[in-house]
């Protein structure tokens, strides 16, 4: 009988790894401790549950590295992208997902596959034999995290990941807010009006910043340090870096025209993005926070249009652990000290739903190939997936290793003319080269 692949963790990476391996004909067991053992951020026992944003970010596969990663995962038959497309919500040029139907569909597809078994057994130690992928993500259980630390001989790195609040749509004052995507981006009317916008005057903004800085914050436990990932900074941490930081970040007023007062340019704008297909829930874009719950309602109700807001979920903060992959993993994502174990997803030091799923896709294919007696090299570094795996398995500086989103800075340079126009042409050249290389990689697998 063919050997079984065991996957610890049923998030984005674990789910995608299981799908890819099973499609290759390898039996898979997913060990997902939820719902028997819960976490701070998860609400269900479903696989691939989205605990932070509901956005997969840009879907532009011609001039955006994240969009290119979407393209590669679709080309490779990725389950996560298939289900994301099936449960897509209007979001301008981004790919936003109706989170509950999405995770329910991923769970149904995986449980229905004849080669996949799902168990709620908690894995608390590193296995000594067999074929394993550890894809436990940012909320790895304490016992397993300690086992990983003991094996690697190094402290796991850590930062804190914050969750944005979700507002009930019916409680948003639409006599103040208006629907519009930045720069009217999108192919359809729904896409061009995918966001709700709350305008602020200078006085509104200054008062908001004052309240934000003065609000009660969650305290860290003794011995913990706040090493945030810059792509997911709590809003109050951004404000502490300078009073204008938010106005040039998530609250920038550019590309928007107030439908109620088109002759008045807002000083700042708070955007809300649709969070479910019914349009009953909206999340406040970029408003991850570590404020205490009472402080959150007080501060966020200062936003024009949200003065009567009701919250389906307030923001929160949780610890996010990851390993020093450039030191610990080989080019096949195997733990050098125990090569029968691979790591995938956020625990390897990639950041974001799509990046995590992509590393799961590679780990699943590589593990399946090994079980089947074949050798599967990673895609070339000219591809989005190849650039990511190269970064985490040796391309990054181990001493300063931090979580990384996919970006063109990870790709081998390409010749193109400079300037703003030249940058767009260069990005297109990156994606054209990547697609050719990735297709060759797929064809090479037969």
Image (cartoon, grey):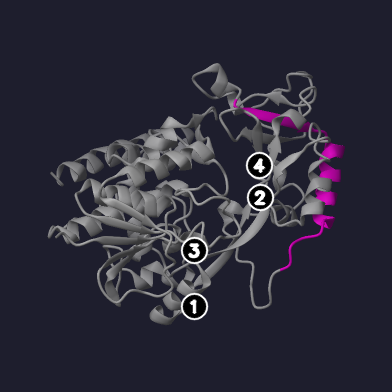
Whether residue 286 is visible: yes
Mark seen at residue 155: 1
Q: Is residue 99 left or right of residue 369?
A: right
Q: Is 155 on the left-hand or right-hand side of 408? A: right
- Residue beneath the point at 76% across and 26% down: 265
* In contact (CB < 8 Å): disc 2 and disc 3: no
Q: Nearer the viewer, mark 4 or mark 2?
A: 2
Residue 118 lies in the magenta-colored region: no
Circle 3 packing at 10 Å, graded few (<14), some (14-19), many (20+), is many
Q: CA distance from mark 1 to mark 2?
A: 27 Å
| Quadrant of the image occupied by residue 113 | top left
Expressed as whole percent of the image width and height from the top left, the position of residue 220 reads 69, 69
Q: Residues within 10 Å of mark 4 (few under 14, many from 20)?
A: some
Label 1 or label 2, whichever comes before in sequence order: 1
Confirm or deny contact between disc 1 and disc 4 (CB under 8 A).
no
> The magenta stretch spans which residues?
194-219
Pointers 4 and 2 in contact (C-beta within 8 Å): no
Question: In the drawing, does residue 300 fall left or right of residue 379?
Answer: right
Q: Quadrant of residue 75?
A: top left
- The residue that disc 2 covers is 288
Q: Quadrant of the N terminus?
A: bottom left
Image location (x, y in percent) of residue 66: 43, 42
Alpha carbon distance from label 4 to label 3: 22 Å
What SS does tag 4 mark? loop
**Residue ID for mark 4:** 250
Mark closest to the chain's N terminus, 4 or 3: 4
The Cα atoms of the two marked residues, 1 and 4, are separated by: 33 Å
In the rendered image, residue 211 lying in the magenta stretch gets the answer: yes
Q: Nearer the viewer, residue 437 or 242?
A: 437
Q: CA distance from mark 1 to mark 3?
A: 14 Å
Disc with the residue nearer the chain's start (2 vs 3): 2
Q: Nearer the viewer, mark 2 or mark 3?
A: 2
């Amino acid at each position: 009988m063919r050997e079984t692949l065991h996957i610890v963790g049923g998030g984005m990476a674990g789910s995608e790894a299981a799908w890819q391996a099973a499609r290759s004909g390898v039996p898979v067991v997913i060990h997902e401790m939820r719902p028997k053992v819960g976490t701070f951020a998860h609400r269900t026992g479903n696989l691939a549950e989205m605990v932070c944003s509901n956005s997969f970010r840009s879907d532009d596969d011609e001039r955006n590295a994240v969009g290119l990663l979407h393209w590669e995962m679709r080309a490779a038959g990725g389950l996560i992208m298939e289900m994301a497309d099936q449960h897509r919500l209007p979001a301008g040029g981004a790919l936003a997902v109706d989170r509950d139907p999405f995770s329910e569909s991923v769970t149904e597809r995986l449980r229905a596959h004849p080669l996949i078994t799902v168990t709620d057994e908690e894995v608390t130690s590193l296995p000594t034999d067999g074929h394993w992928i550890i894809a436990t993500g940012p909320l790895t259980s304490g016992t397993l995290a300690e086992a990983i630390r003991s094996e690697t001989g190094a402290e796991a790195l850590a930062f804190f990941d914050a969750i944005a609040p979700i507002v009930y749509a019916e409680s948003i004052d639409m006599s103040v807010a208006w629907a519009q995507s930045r720069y009217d981006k999108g192919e359809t009317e729904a896409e061009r009006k995918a966001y709700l916008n709350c305008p602020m005057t200078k006085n509104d903004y200054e008062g908001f910043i004052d309240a934000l800085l003065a609000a009660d914050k969650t305290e860290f436990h003794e011995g913990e340090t706040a090493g945030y990932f810059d792509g997911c900074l709590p809003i109050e941490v951004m404000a502490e870096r300078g009073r204008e930081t938010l106005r040039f970040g998530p609250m920038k007023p550019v590309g928007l025209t107030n439908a109620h007062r088109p002759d008045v340019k807002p000083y700042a704008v708070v955007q809300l993005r649709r969070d479910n297909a019914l349009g009953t829930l909206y999340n406040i874009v970029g408003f991850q926070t570590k404020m205490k719950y009472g402080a959150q309602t007080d501060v966020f109700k200062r936003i024009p249009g949200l003065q009567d807001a009701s919250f389906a979920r307030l923001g929160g903060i949780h610890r996010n652990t990851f390993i020093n992959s450039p030191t610990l993993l080989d080019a096949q994502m195997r733990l050098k000290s125990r090569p029968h174990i691979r790591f995938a997803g956020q625990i390897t030091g990639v950041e974001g739903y799509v990046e995590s799923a992509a590393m799961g896709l590679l780990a699943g294919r590589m593990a399946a190939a090994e079980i089947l007696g074949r050798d599967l090299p990673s895609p070339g570094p000219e591809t989005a997936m190849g650039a990511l795996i190269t970064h985490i398995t040796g391309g990054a500086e181990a001493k300063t290793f931090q979580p990384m989103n996919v970006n063109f800075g990870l790709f081998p340079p390409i010749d193109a003319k400079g300037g703003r126009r030249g940058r767009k042409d260069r990005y297109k050249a990156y994606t054209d080269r990547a697609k050719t290389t990735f297709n060759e990689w797929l064809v090479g697998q037969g």
